[in-house]
Amino acid sequence: MDYLTYSHNHNLVVLSLLLAVVSGFTGFTLTQNLSAKTLSQRKISVSMAAVALGGGIWSMHFVAMLGLNLPVMVFYDAAITLASALIAILIVAVALILLHFFVRTSVTIVLAGCIVGSGILLMHYTGMAGLQLCKPIYTVQGLVLSSIVAFFSCIVAFWVAYKERNNRNIFFATLCFGIAVVSVHFIAILNTKFLEGSANSEFGPLISNETLAVIVVLSSFFILCLFLWVSATFLSPHVMKPEKLKDEKVLSEGTKFGPQHIPCERDGLKVFIPLKDVLAIRADGHYSQVYTEKEKYFCVWPITEVNRRLESFGFIKVHRSYIVNSARVDRFERLKDKGYCVFGTPMAPRIPVSRSKLKAAQEAIITTPGTIGAK
């Protein structure tokens, strides 16, 4: 069996590595400091990071494929090529959702790394399946080695990036991610043999190397634009640490803000809401929503942290997802085995009271000055 001989364009190999590093830096930077953003802002940032990381994996692969010099002309199935891009982006998105919308532990970080590693592998071999006029023949050695490198290097990259979120770790994680993507591709390619074949596209139209080059240039341009944008943010002075220290003191001592406050955000701006104005607080994933008479605010504290900080200020946890300011409850309604805290403003929701909290909540609300009583 006569296998085709091939070589690589070294300039495109270097470019593929650069693109992998740029996409890694962009993705990891886009997901930095998400706790200081609103829920909608976090969703947008995670989506953009998934496109940057997943798109970077795809773009790197096909830049390297453009640099693969084969003695025959090759084409690509457009549908399979597009599917490989979607696979990379969607699988990376699953990993980022796991890290940013669920409780982040050592297990979830390792799992996210494994998910991204599997995404790199699936993207590579799906992309190779779209190759026309040239049939790739894989070896067991190549499959095993590329899989080991993919999982190990991605776990390292995400462990470094997410175990402690700082600029130094983002640099190291970026290098690990770039090495992961490039190593998987070239280890797999070096252990792959090629046979001349015929065009047998079953899914979509064929695209030539020239057309593929245009698509890759456009995707790379988009990633580089994101890179330039996040670089400006990355290099700008950070003011998070002073605010964080201020948040720690707001409820522990009488600061220059006067009465005790709870740090919140609205429309991207930091605001401090006096505790006397707070009616109720609702859990929102790892964060919370703070209700006043007329507005609703975003708070970066989880409901457990809110309960710990506000318990001594007359706030009571009436449900696993709700905390109320007992001094602001207008009345307590009990209907058989259900209970509700009702406020005197139509803007505030009726807060459910869990069965295990009924008696304690009723007693606390009735005996708190300022409440009207039970119904």
Image: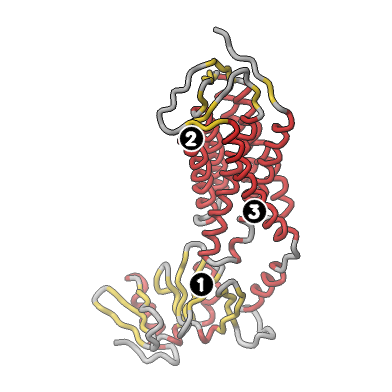
Q: Which residue is mark 3?
A: 226
Q: Nearer the viewer, residue 215 or 118?
A: 215
Whichever of labels 3 and 1 marks the residue nearer the N terminus, that label is 3
> Upstream in the sequence, badge 2 or badge 1?
2
Please indicate whether residue 315 sits to the left or right of residue 29 in the image. left
Q: Where residue 207 sits in the image (x, y, percent)?
A: 52, 32
Mark 1 neighbour density, 10 Å: few (under 14) some (14–19) many (20 or more) = some
Which numbered marker is on residue 307? 1
Q: Which label number is shown at residue 292?
A: none
Q: Secondary structure at mark 2?
A: helix
State the residue position of label 2.
78
Secondary structure under the numbered disc 3 in the rendered image:
helix
Label 2, label 3: how far apart the Cα atoms are = 25 Å
Q: Nearer the viewer, residue 97 or 236?
A: 236
User: What percent of the width, then of the height, locates residue 345?
Assistant: 40, 87
Residue located 50% across and 57% down the image: 101
How far apart are the alpha carbons under marks 2 and 1? 54 Å
Q: Is residue 131 left or right of residue 218?
A: left
**Residue 55 coordinates in the image, percent (x, y):** 57, 44
Kindly identify the residue that appears in the image at 48 percent across and 62 percent down.
Answer: 285
> Gap between marks 3 and 1, in whole Å?
39 Å
Q: Position of residue 6 (x, y in %)?
A: 65, 19
- On screen, residue 151 above or below 323: above
Say which amino acid is labelled 3. Leu
2 and 3 marks in contact (CB < 8 Å): no
